[in-house]
Amino acid sequence: MIAYLVDNILGVFALNSNGDIIDKVLFEGSVDEISQKIYMLEKSEVISELRDLIGKLIEGGVSELVLEDEKLARRIKREFGVNVKIELPSKLAQKFRRELPEYLSKVGIDYENYLDKLFEISQTLTKMKVREAAERRDLFIAQSISAIDEIDRTINLFASRLREWYGLHFPELGELIREHELYAKVVANIGLRDNMRAEQLIALGLDEKKARRIVDVAKKSMGAKMTSFDIEYIQAFASQLLRLYELRRKLEVYVDEAMKEVAPNIRGLVGPLLGARLIALAGGLNKLATLPASTIQVLGAEKALFRALRTGGKPPKHGVIFQYPAIFRAPRWQRGKIARALAAKLAIAARIDVFSGEYKADVLKDEIEKRIREIKELYPRPPPRKTEPVRRTGKKKKRRRRKR
C-alpha cells in the first residue's frame, strides 16, 4: 500500500492512491509552537507528529511513502527503513491543496477558521525567518567591513583637511611627516610650531634625526602665525581623527574574531579583512559558497566586467582579491594567473566553511603558494606582444605621369 504525505498548517495528512485521507496528525499548541513545527518541516526535520503518523501507517500495512521533500525523504528512509519515493510536484498533494475546503469539511474543520489561523501562523513564520536572517553572523561581518571602508574614506577626508588647515601655520610639516596618523598626533599633542621640542616628537614615535629636523624647520617656517584660540579647534579636529583610527583598529579586531568563528578557512587563506570583503560583496557566506571560482575572481570589478562585455574590450583579470599580497606584488603578466588560482582555492574554502566546518586553510595555503611559485618559474618574462595585421582600406591609386 502506498501513502502520500502532505503537510499543512493544521498537521500532516496521509492520502491513498485515490486521494482519500487514510490518516492524519493535527498540530496542537499555541501559534508559536505550531509555527516552530512548520518551520522545522520546511527545514526537512522529522518532527514528533510526522514520526507518530509514519509509525501508524507502517502498522496499518503501508509499504511505501511518497513525499515532495527529497532531504526529508532520505531522513525518513534512514530512520524507519521504509521505501520512500520522491514526486515533485506530487499530483495528489496538488489535488489536496486545490480542493482544500472539501478536505477540511471531511475532517470537521471550518474553512473560515482555517483562514484566520493561516494568517496568524504566516505572520509568526515570517517574523521567525526575518529574525533568523538578521542573526546570521556573516551579515554582521559584512556590515563591519563596510564600516571599516567608510571609516577609511572619512580618515582620508579628515587627514586632507587637517593638512590644509594646519599647513597654513606650518606648511613644511606635511613633507616631513607622510603618515596621516603620526601627523595628527603631532598636531593634537603639540599644536603651535613654536612648541615643537625634540623630546616630545620622539615620545610620539618619530626617530631622533627627523625630530630634530622638524624642530629646526619650525624655527624658520614661512607659515602664518596662529593664536591659541585658532590652534585649539585644529587640535580638537586632529583628536577626532585619532579617535577614528582607534575605532578602525577595534573593528579590525572584531572582524578577525568573527571570521575565526564564521569562516575560518577563508580567514586562514586570505586574511580576515579581505575574506570579510568577499563575503560582503557576495551578499553572505552561503552565497559566496555557491559562486564559481570565475565569479569570485572578479568580485568587486563588476563595472569593469560589464563595460568589457558591452564594448567588447578585455575583461578584468581580478577584482577585490587584487589586495592579496602575492597578486599586487607580482608582475603584471602573472597577476591574472595567480588571481585565477587563488579564486579556485577561495571557492573550496567557502564551501568547506559552509558545509563541512573542517579547518583546511593550511593545506589550501600550501597549495596556492606552490602554484604561485610554479607561475613565477613558468612565466618569468612577459609574453611577446601580438602584432595585428595592417588592414588596407582601399586599392592603391596609380600615379599619372605628366606629359612634358
Image (cartoon, helix red, strand yellow):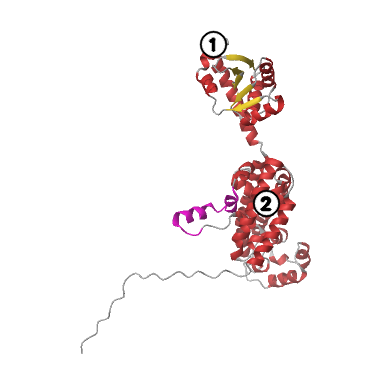
- From the top left corner, tell me how far across and down residue 268 is, in percent: 72, 51
Q: Observer-nearest residue: 376 or 110?
A: 376
User: Can residue 34 be seen at all in this image of the molecule?
Assistant: yes
Image quadrant in which the C terminus is located: bottom left
In the rendered image, residue 294 lying in the magenta stretch gets the answer yes
SS assignment at label 2:
helix
> What is the crowding at mark 1: few (fewer than 14 residues within 10 Å), some, or many (at least 20)?
few
Q: Which residue is mark 1?
A: 105
Give the left or right position of residue 177, taking residue 110 as reference: right
Query: Nearer the viewer's eye, disc 1 or disc 2?
Result: 1
Q: Which residue is mark 2?
A: 273
Q: CA distance from mark 1 to mark 2?
A: 59 Å
Q: Residue furthest left?
A: 404
Residue 370, relative to residue 404: is it above or below?
above
Residue 32: quarter of image = top right
Q: Earlier in the sequence, mark 1 or mark 2?
A: 1
Q: Which mark is residue 321?
A: none
Query: Callout 2, which amino acid?
Result: Leu
For the point 69% across and 49% down, the residue is 266
> What is the crowding at mark 2: few (fewer than 14 residues within 10 Å), some, or many (at least 20)?
many
User: Marks 1 and 2: CB-CB under 8 Å?
Assistant: no
In the rendered image, residue 299 lying in the magenta stretch gets the answer yes
